[in-house]
Amino acid sequence: MTPPSRAVSVAVPVPALGCLSYLVPEHLAMPEVGTRVLVPLGTRVLTGCVIARDATSDPSDLKPLIDLLDTTPLLPADVVQLALWVGDYYASGPGQAVAAAMPPKAWVVSERHAQITPAGRDALSGQLSEGRRQVLDLLTDGGAHPVARLARAIAETQRGPEMRQGGLYARVTALARDELITLSQPLKGSASAFKSVSVARATPHGLEMLERGQLQGARQLDALRLLSGTPSGIALTELVRHGISRDTVRRLALRGALTSTREVIERDPWLGGAQTLTDAARSDGAPSPELVLTDEQQSAVDTLGPDAGTGLFSVALLQGVTGSGKTEIYLTLARAAVARHRQALILVPEIALTPAVATRFRRAFGDRVAVQHSGLSDGARHDQWHRIRRGEIDVVVGTRSAVFAPLPSVGLIVVDEEHDGSYKQEESPRYHGRDVAVMRAKQAGALVVLGSATPALETYRHAEAGRYRRVVLTERVLSRPLPSVRIIDMREEFAEHGPDVVLSGALVEALDDRVTRGEQALILLNRRGYAASVFCRQCARSLECPNCSVSLTFHRRSDRARCHYCGYSRSRPERCPECTGAYLEQVGFGTERVEAEIAERWPDARVARLDRDTVRRQGAAARLLNRFGAGELDVLVGTQMVAKGHDFPRVTLVGVISADVGLGVADFRAGERTFQLLTQVAGRAGRGVLPGEAIVQTLYPNHYSIRYACRQAYEPFFADEMEFRTAMHYPPEVALVSAVVRAPTFNQAMQDAAELAQGARARASRFTVLGPASAPLGRLRGQYRAQLLLKGPQRGEMRRALLAALEGRGELKRRVAIDVDPLSML
Ligand code: ADP
Ligand code: ZN
C-alpha cells in the first residue's frame, strides 16, 4: 500500500496563476482545506491558502512548503468552495478569488522567530556549511529574531544575486530540525492582527489592603477604589485618563494588589461609528414600536417564511414598488432563519446604506449583528470577521464582498436592490455579488431573496420562466401614493431661455414651494463637477486627458480640470493648449454647478452635495445622509448615490436635472440603467405622511425608459427592452464574455486582440466572436484598449476558448481582462 500523498494544492494571490502544488514536510501536520500556508514562489515567499489535497502530482517533483500559519483552517471549507467556483466562473483563477474571500490582514509573511540553542552555539565552533553559519552568526546574541529580518540581513551582506528567501526558509527549517535553533510558533501574524490592551484587575489581596487601610498614597488608593468597583478590570489607558499613571499601576502590581494582563479587544464599528448609528436611529423615529405588517407584507412573509432556514435551496424575487416596506420583510425572514438555528446574510449595494439597515437589524438581534464592508477600518473589519467565524453572529449586513462572510450555516441571503450595478466588482475577480449569493445559497441550502422595485432583466426573466419564485408588493405601506411625476421637455426651455438653463421653471417653482414650507428635496444629476468639459471656440477641441480618451471635467472649487478615470488634473489654462486660442468655454454642467445655482437662488436654504468629490473620506457619505435624514439640510444635490434605497420620510420633491445623461453611453444596458435610476430616485419622494412629487427634466421626453420610469411601470418596460435585447442578441437573451487587451500602442493592442480573437474562433462551436475593436474607452491610464465580445448560449465554452487561446502566453495574459457577464461595456 502506498502511503497517502503529502501534496497539497495552494492558491496564492497572484493574477493569472493557477493553483500550485507543494509538498508538506514531514515535521508539519497535513493542513486542512482553508489553512493558510507559507510557500516559496520563485524568489518570493507568499501566503497561500490550501484548497485541496493533491493526490495526482508526483511528490518528488514538488517543492516543500515552508510553514503552516493556522492550526485550524482560517477559511471554512464551503467558503473555499465558493471562492473556487468564482475563480472558475469568472475566469480569474483561484488565487484572486480566494483572496477576495479572505479577511483583511490575512496575508502575512511569516512572523516566525528563530533563536539559537546551546547545540547551535557548539556547532558554530565546528564544521558548518556557509549558509548555516550565516544564519547562526546572526543569532549569537541569543535573542529571538524574525526570520524575515534574517532574510533581509543576509540579502544585504550578499554581493551576488539576491538571496532567495525561499531558500533561507528551507535552511532555517533544516536548522530547526537538527535542533541548532528553535522556531517560535508561527501564529503571531494572525494573532497580532487582533488588537490587545492591558487590563488591570484588583486581586483579593489588594482588596484586603484597601479595606485595612494599608495603601500609601492617594493615587494608589484611587486606583484600588476604582478597581474594586469594576471586577471585570479597567484598561490601563482608561486608568491614565483618571490620573493614575502606569508607574502607580506597576507599584501596585509589585505589591500584589493588582494584576495586569493583555487582552484582545474587539474593534467595534458600532463604537467608531457611534454617532452615525445613533443619528440613523434617530432619523427614522424614536424606538419603533413593532410594526403591524401590511396585508401584502404578511402574505410575502407567509409565502417565503417557511423556506427560511429549512435547508432547502430556493430563489425568490421580491418585487416591491419603492416604499413598499421590503426591509421589514427581510427582518421577519431573518427571525425565521435564526429561530431555526441558521444565520442570515443581508447584502446592500452601498457602504452608505449599511448603517441604516444594520441599525434596524441591531434593534431586533442586538449585538449578534456584524457588518462587513470596505468602509470599515481593516482592524474593525478583521475583528468582525473573526466574530462571524467564531459563530457569535446571527446576522451579517454588508456590501458585495460580505457574500463570502464565514457564517457557519447560512439559511437566508437577502440581496437588497439586486439590480444595482455596485454588486459587480470591476476588478479581478470580476464577480457579481448577487449571482455569487445565489450560488452560495445553492451550496448551503438557503433561501435567497432578491429585492427590488426594478429587477435586473436577468432576474425578472428567471422569475418569468418559473426558475425564481416571484412575490409582488404593488402598494406602498399604509396605502401611501406613489409620487406623481412630471416630465419637462428641456428643448422648450432652451428655446425660450437659451441653452444654459440648469433649473427649469417648473423645478424652480416646486423647489420654492418646498423651501417655503420647510420640506425636503433631493436633486439628481448623474455627473460630477462644475462643467462637463472645456471647449475651445477657435479649434473646436476640448481639453482632453493625456492618459485617457475622455475630456476633462472642470471643478470650480479646486479650480482644476480633472479626469474622472485616472485622476489626472491640471489647472485651468488661460489659452487652448492646442491652438493657443483665447476663447475657452465651459460646456455642460454637473452637480457642483447645480448646487451652486440652488445655493445662490435660495441663500437661506441649507444645501449640500453628495457625490464622490464631497465624500472621499471614510464615513462621510453616511454622515451627510444622516444630517439630511435628521432634517439638518433642506436640499441634497447628488449623483446616483442619492437615488439608492434611502428612506427619508420628509422628502416631498425629487428633481432630476438631466434624465438622459446615461442614454448617450455606448452600452446596450443604457436604457435599463436609466429606467432603474429614474424609478428609484422618484421613489425617494413621498415616503412619509406627505405625498411626493418628482420633476424630470430631459431632452428626450419620449424615450421609452423615461416614460415608463415616470409611471413606475416595470412590466411594460421589461417587455419593450426584452424585444430590443432579443433582436440584437444581447443578454439576457445570450450570455456575454468580454476580453479587453491593454497595450502601450494602439496597434499592439489591436494585434494582440486579433490573435486572441483568432484563437477563440478556432475553438468556437456555438458562440460568435465580435471584434477586435477599440474599446469605447479606447485609452485608459496611458494604455490603449482593444476589445473582443463573445456571445453564445454557454459561458463555459467561451471562457474555456479564451483561456485556451491564452495558454502559455503569460505576458499577454497579464494584459487581458476577461469579464464574464460584464456590466460595464466601456
Ligand atoms: P422599500 O425598501 O420597499 O423601499 P422600506 O423597507 O425602506 O421600503 O420601508 C419604507 C418605510 O415604510 C420605512 O420608513 C418603514 O419603516 C415603513 N414601514 C415598513 N413597513 C411598515 C408597516 N407595516 N407599517 C408602517 N410603516 C411601515
Ligand atoms: Zn485620465
Image (tube, rainbow, N blue to C red):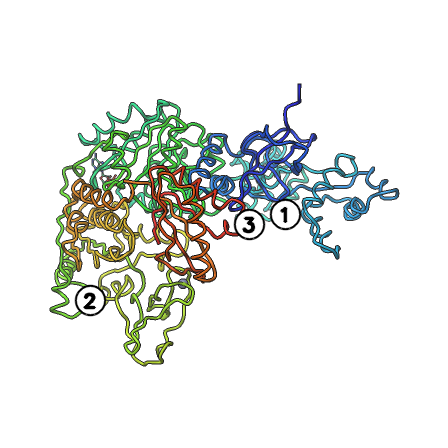
* Front residue of this view, candidates 92 and 216: 92
The alpha-carbon separation of the residues under discs 1 and 3 comes to 49 Å
Percent position of residue 177, x then y = 75, 34
The alpha-carbon separation of the residues under discs 2 and 3 comes to 54 Å
Circle 2 — which element? helix
In the rendering, which numbered label is found on residue 187? none
Circle 3 — which element? loop
**For the residue marked with disc 3, what is the amino acid?**
Gly
Q: Give the residue number, with chain letter if any, for mark 3.
A: 243
Closest to the camera, between mark 1 and mark 3, is 1
Q: Earlier in the sequence, mark 2 or mark 3?
A: 3
For this view, does 241 lie left or right of residue 165? left
Percent position of residue 144, x then y = 72, 43
Rendering quadrant holding ligand 2: bottom left
Q: Quadrant of residue 345?
A: top left
> Within 10 Å of the Cα at label 3, are there few (<14), some (14-19), or many (20+) other Cα atoms?
few
Count the marks: how many?
Answer: 3
Q: Residue at x 59, y 46 (%)?
A: 218
In the rendering, which numbered label is found on residue 44? 1
Observer able to see residue 795: yes
For this view, does 262 lie left or right of residue 733? right
**For the residue marked with disc 1, what is the amino acid?**
Arg
* Front residue of this view, candidates 495 and 205: 495
Q: Is mark 2 within 8 Å of ligand 1?
A: no
Vertical arrangement, residue 588 with respect to residue 338, above or below: below
Q: Earlier in the sequence, mark 1 or mark 2?
A: 1
**For the residue marked with disc 2, what is the amino acid?**
Arg
In the rendering, which numbered label is found on residue 601? 2
